Amino acid sequence: MGPQAGGGTVMSTPLVKLTGVSKYYGNIRALRDVSLEVSAGEITCVLGDNGAGKSTLIKIIAGLHRHDAGTFEIEGEETVLANPRAALDRGIATVYQDLAVVPLMPVWRNFFLGSEPTRGRGPFRRLDVAHMRETTRAELLRMGIDLRDVDQPIGTLSGGERQCVAIARAVHFGAKVLVLDEPTAALGVKQSGVVLKYVAAARDAGLGVVLITHNPHHAHLVGDRFVLLKRGAMAGSHTRDSITLDELTRQMAGGSELDELSHELERVAESGPDTPSGSTPATASDRDDTTR
Ligand SMILES: Nc1ncnc2c1ncn2[C@@H]1O[C@H](COP(=O)(O)OP(=O)(O)OP(=O)(O)O)[C@@H](O)[C@H]1O
Ligand SMILES: [Mg+2]
């Protein structure tokens, strides 16, 4: 592998390494011979079209599904995760696209969901609300997220802000690996930028990040490694210094398929004015009007 874009001297064992992994759903082979690695302080992007197998791949890393062939190593040790809890225990936190949040509960409550600290003992044991509020505020601030009010229901936050809270949460609870399934898919340009900034912040905090995306621009902005999936198989694996954004975009779109599409679109554009042949004068003058 070449030198890392992050400038770090990352030569240690990868946090997560998949080698030749395959996965079947009944007779359907969703993944065929896929390899990928993620190291501390690095972002590995998984790119591919709908149905390429991206979610299947992260479900294996997240402990939701088991691979049928190949090896899955965590910090150099071959592993088969029994369930998502086992993945969490090994430091792998996954943020799914449909974030598992309770919309009406305050931000701090969601931040601690399932890991609430308590104070007192026996019958006096209760949730340490003040601590949760303060910690949530502090942790979000540490990531550079300045929420007006951690008491507001999380449902009132934008999609991007919710993704950021989920990322801050994983960092706070000590995740080593952060897996994100299309965190920017439903977001506009500006919010995508904000989320990518926190993805980079998690990387800078030393986590290894697996970022699933359709978007080669988003991938190229933050990625150190790129794995391209096509119909369940690897269509390419690159480090940042070995591929340009243009080439990544081209490969994502399937290279020659993109050229073909662009020719087809040109043909449509060229033949456009001829199509309504009977009403050519009217449409022509309409067009003249609108362009003035
Ligand atoms: N539980 C399942 N049972 C059967 N087939 C499945 C199951 N989950 C996924 N598949 C199939 O496996 C293939 C890969 O699906 P996967 O969800 O991993 O793709 P993806 O890359 O995440 O797509 P998208 O971009 O649409 O989210 C698809 O052909 C899909 O229909
Ligand atoms: Mg998916």
Image (tube, helix red, strand yellow):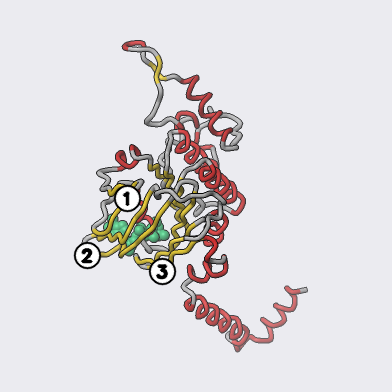
Rendered-image quarter of ligand 1? bottom left
The residue tagged with tag 1: helix, strand or loop? strand
**Where in the figure is residue 164, as x and y percent of width and height?**
52, 41
**In the image, which disc is placed on residue 235?**
3
Amino acid at dot 1? Glu
**Where in the figure is residue 167, as x and y percent of width and height?**
48, 41
Asked if disc 3 is less than 8 Å from ligand 1, the answer is no
The residue tagged with tag 2: helix, strand or loop? loop
Q: Rounded to the nearest whole Å, what is the CA distance between mark 3 and mark 1? A: 22 Å
**N-term mark: 3 or 1:** 1
Instruction: Relative to 237, say whether 276 is above or below.
Output: below
Looking at the image, which is closer to me, 187 or 203? 203
**Where in the figure is residue 109, as x and y percent of width and height?**
45, 29
Residue at the farthest right position: 292
Amino acid at dot 2? Asn
- How dense is the environment of label 3, judged by Cα within 10 Å: few (below 14), some, or many (20 and up)? some
**Where in the figure is residue 45, as x and y percent of width and height?**
47, 56
Instruction: Relative to 155, say whether 199 is above or below.
Output: below
Amino acid at dot 3? Ala
Looking at the image, which is closer to me, 162 or 84? 84
The residue tagged with tag 3: helix, strand or loop? strand
**Residue named by callout 1:** 73
What residue is at 50 percent from the left and 37 percent from the top? 168
**Residue named by callout 2:** 27
